[in-house]
Image (tube, helix red, strand yellow):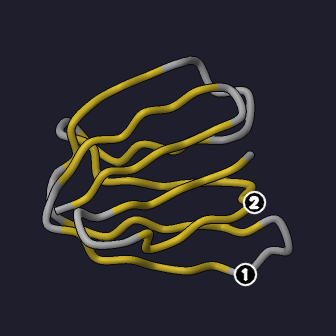
Amino acid sequence: MKCDIVSARRTVYSGEVSMVIAPGVVGDLGIAPQHAPLMTTLNAGAIRIIEAQGNEITFLIGGGIIEVMPHLVTVLVD
């Protein structure tokens, strides 16, 4: 699935991923391909991206919003 992490100033990350782990308000969210549609706020913390090739990348955020569709995850971060 495609993942875009966007701040007010620029696109922080854009690429194909196999998993996104984000700090949701009530706990960590694990998002895999074909996840049910979802929109929620995020707490400050780390977003972990596992790329299609298996590499793991971590981004620290101050909070934000995540929108999940079956083939696309969009994260708007502070």
| Residue in the image at 53% along x and 56% along y | 4
Q: Position of residue 69 (x, y in %)?
A: 59, 27
Q: Position of residue 65 (x, y in %)?
A: 26, 42
Q: In this image, 40 relative to 12: left or right? A: left
Query: Which amino acid type corresponds to the residue marked 2 in the rendered image?
Result: Glu
Q: Is residue 50 above or below residue 32?
A: below
In this view, the mark in front (2 or 1): 2
| Residue in the image at 16% along x and 52% along y | 43
Query: Which amino acid type corresponds to the residue marked 1 in the rendered image?
Result: Asn
Give the quarter of the image for residue 32: top right
Q: Nearer the viewer, residue 8 or 43?
A: 8
Q: Position of residue 48 (x, y in %)?
A: 48, 68
Dot 1, how many residues are within 10 Å of its Cα: few (below 14), some (14-19), or many (20+)? few
Q: In this image, 4 relative to 27: left or right? A: right
Label number found at residue 55: 1
Give the quarter of the image for residue 61: bottom left
Q: Disc 2 or 1, which lies upstream in sequence? A: 2
- Direction front: furthest residue: 9
User: Would you name the residue on which mark 2 appears?
Assistant: 16
| Residue in the image at 44% along x and 61% along y | 5
